[in-house]
Image (cartoon, rainbow, N blue to C red):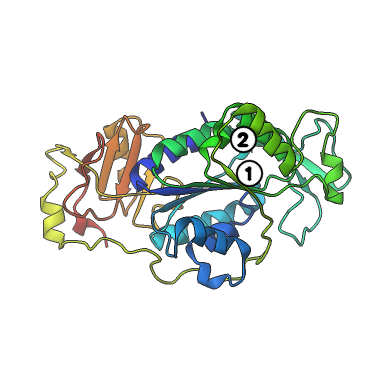
Amino acid sequence: MCKGVQSLSAFLHLANCTHAYLDVGSNIGVQIRKLFEPQKYANAPVVQVFQQIFGPAPHCNVCAIGIEPNVRHADRLLELERRLTNAHAHVAILRVGAATTDGEARFVVPNFFDAKEDWAARIPVRSGHLPIGFVDTRVQTLDLAALIRRVRAAITGQLVMKLDVEGQEQLILPHLVATSALCLVDFALIEWHQSMQWHKEFYDRSAQGLFSDSDLQQALRKTCASCPVQVVTLDDETYLHDGMSWPNASLCARPAMRNESQHVAMLAPDDQRTPVRGLCGNTLPLSGSCEAVDSGAWSMPKTLSECVMACRQCNRCNYVSFSKQAHHACSWFHACQAPLRTRGTFRTLRVRSYNHVS
């Protein structure tokens, strides 16, 4: 299992969302912004879909999980994740490619300026084939079926998946059907690519695969007599370059903090090193620098002591919450509200005084 999925497990455990949105093939993340900031994206088709499924905005009970391997979009997606997290929306971006197995794969990108935000970048279906104007690189991949099962187990409401993988649907969708993972999805928003001229060099018509909505529906009928997934062919490329300002206020309500003496006094001082059962609050695992935000999570610490050591390297970290059962989740906080949340096997420790830093 890739490191990003381990971190995602902690994210889902802590966020405790009712619904989830899988944005498979995020590009620069505009669809995720349409989920949480629909007022900025007038007439975008997917906004109406989100409203029909999740209800009116804000969608504060929805966890949005983006999947995008293109390194050219990494800085933009990191900023998107940070901005929306600071606005108290639940967002996590996995910098991997969707595939049928965990591992690595070829990833081709245009070696020219692409005015369409690298639409042509992809994991090619045809092995060894490299069209003129493209260069090779390698990316980490995850098994999308396993990810769907993990997300479904963490929520009780609707699971929506957008699949825009530039031709890889030919191989990914048969895998999701064969493993019954697609039947765990309530709504699948799929963009098909086989009919587009600039995709033909990447397709392999001699291989087994699914190439259209009718192919998919036929495969589902053969595999499962009753599969609840609703398949929607959707290609919403509105606001291609985004162009919208980042949120300057909270998108979702934040629980009110009690006064400082309450939340400091409730935790054991550093010299006692006595953890208190519970956790400070929800965090996101893939946030940016700990010097710029108020909370986050690290996946590397395997013990509470290692979690404390990581906290000491971050000037804004005053508290840690740790659980081995949640894939060694080590969450850190600048401030900790009372009372602690009693979720799972988390234990919380005050690493330094809240007044130690600003």
Category of crowding for the residue at label 2, using alpha-carbon neighbours closer than 10 angstroms: few (below 14), some (14–19), many (at least 20): some
Classify residue 207 by image quadrant. top right
Is residue 237 left or right of 335 when viewed as pictured? Answer: right
Q: Residue furthest right?
A: 132
Nearer to me, 31 or 330: 31
Is residue 233 left or right of 94 when viewed as pictured? Answer: right
- Residue drawn at point x = 19 percent, y = 47 percent: 340
Q: Specify the amino acid type for callout 1.
A: Pro
Nearer to me, 106 or 47: 47
In the displayed structure, 179 sits above or below 59; it is above
In the displayed structure, 122 sits above or below 208; it is below
Pointer 1 residue: 69
In the displayed structure, 324 sits above or below 202; it is above
The label number, if any, that marks residue 140 in the structure image? 2
Q: Specify the amino acid type for callout 2.
A: Gln
Residue 35, given in percent of the width and then of the height, sits at 51, 60
In the displayed structure, 139 sits above or below 238; it is above
